[in-house]
Structure formats: C-alpha cells, structure tokens
Image: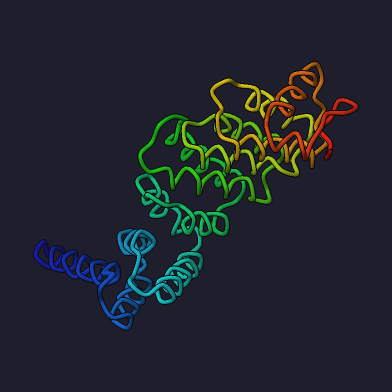
Amino acid sequence: MVFGLFSKEKSLQRTIDKATNKLAQQVDRWAALERLKEDGSDEALFGLCKRFGVTATKGIEDEQEKDWAVEALVAKGEAALGPLRRYMKNAEQLAFPLRVLERIADKPKALEVADELFKSEPPGYVRMPDRRIDLLRWFSEWKPATDEEVVTRLTPYVTDFDENSRFAAIEGMTNRDPAMIGPPLIKALLRPEEESGRIKRTIVEVLEKSKAPLGDKADEVAKAIAGGGPLAQDFKVAGGIVKKA
C-alpha cells in the first residue's frame, strides 16, 4: 500500500511537471491540466494553481491556459480555496489567483485572505514588487470592498519605496470618498522625499477629480502645484480644492 501511494504521488508530480512545462507542446500541457482537474485532490489543485506562475513561450496559448485554469479552479468551488491560499503565499504574481479568489470565497473569507497577503507585503523595499502591485490593483477594483476598507489598506502604500506600487495605490483611491482619500494623498504630495513628477501629477489629478477638501493644507498644496513645473500650467487651488487651471 505504501508503494502504491508513493507511485501515485510520483505520477501526480509528473502530471504537474507537464502542466507547468513552458517549453512543452500546448496539447501536452492541456492534457496534463485536464488530468489535474479530474483528480481534484488538494495537491492536484495546487499543481493547477502553479500553472499561473509559468509563462509559456507563445503568449496567446499562455493566456488561454491560464484563463482555463481559472475556470477549472472556480468550478471546484470552496475545495480550491485551501490550495489557492497555499499557492498565493509564495507566488510572484497574484493577478490570476485573485480572479479565482473573488469567485469562490464570500466577502469575509476573501477579505481574510486579502489581509494575509497585505501582511506578507509590508511597505518598503522589495526586489520584485509584482505581487504587491497585483494585490493593490485587485483590491481597489474589488466591488464588495467599501471605501473605508480600500482606503485604509491602500494608504500605507502611497508612500511605498517602489514607484509603481505608489502609483497603483494612488490610482486605486480614485472614485473613493473624497474626505477619506484627501489626507493620505495630500501628505504624500507634500512629503519632501517624493521626487517623482509622475506620482505628483497622479496625486493632483485624483485630488482634482474627486474634489477632495484640502482643509488647512490648501496653501501648502497650492505652493506644491505652483512649484511643480507643468503642474502649474494645468492645475490650481481655489475654494479649498484642486481645480483645473
């Protein structure tokens, strides 16, 4: 019996290896993916998740297979949640796994998983920020999330070390409660460490679009805009909010 179990594990691993071989023919990868779906065990579904972490040589085929893997995992429902969480702990990219999460978990469970991921991505230097950016973008667009849930989680990242992470967090606050997004965005705009013209413009654009109240920071924001080169040509502060010039 032990030998049989070992043999089955080896067979499953071979199937996972085929499903995640970026150099294999698509027909072979797809057949392996089908077998993993049919198996349905935790280890097989974890192997199915691993397809998200491999980029096949042909872009169209790669996208097709990942989309198929999403649907296959969603079809398994709650049974896929454990393997999915296990996979996301160390995944370099989260875009596809998060598409599965939002469809198989209710809001409390999805929020719990999202918070685990945020905890694993504290603001600061990271060599590969892809998973952080995927998480920020997904959470800002996740429809069940309230303005408070989004703003409180994105705020720490508007001053993140990585510029693209800052950009994702700032953009993610667009269309949220003006009174909530104003303070963190104003603070980010005025901090001396911010040297990116792209980031400053994005902050000002979000403040203008949302009509966020500037409060007692109106004069400081006006000075920042006036000293921001091209910003001064396009924006101004009037009536306690940012407006187009």
Image position of 232 with respect to 19: above or below: above
Image position of 224 with respect to 147: above or below: above
The picture places residue 210, in percent across and down from the top left corner, at 80, 39
Image position of 16 with respect to 167: above or below: below
Judging depth in this view, the residue of 76 and 160 nearest the camera is: 160
In the picture, measured across the screen, residue 145 lies left or right of residue 103, that is: right
* Residue under the image location 40 percent in, 76 percent down: 61
In the picture, measured across the screen, residue 144 lies left or right of residue 244, that is: left
Residue at the outermost top position: 216
* Residue under the image location 49 percent in, 55 percent down: 95
Count of numbered marks: 0
Residue at the outermost bottom position: 27
Quadrant of the drawing holding the N terminus = bottom left
* Residue under the image location 62 percent in, 27 percent down: 188
Residue at the outermost right position: 239
The picture places residue 165, in percent across and down from the top left corner, at 52, 40
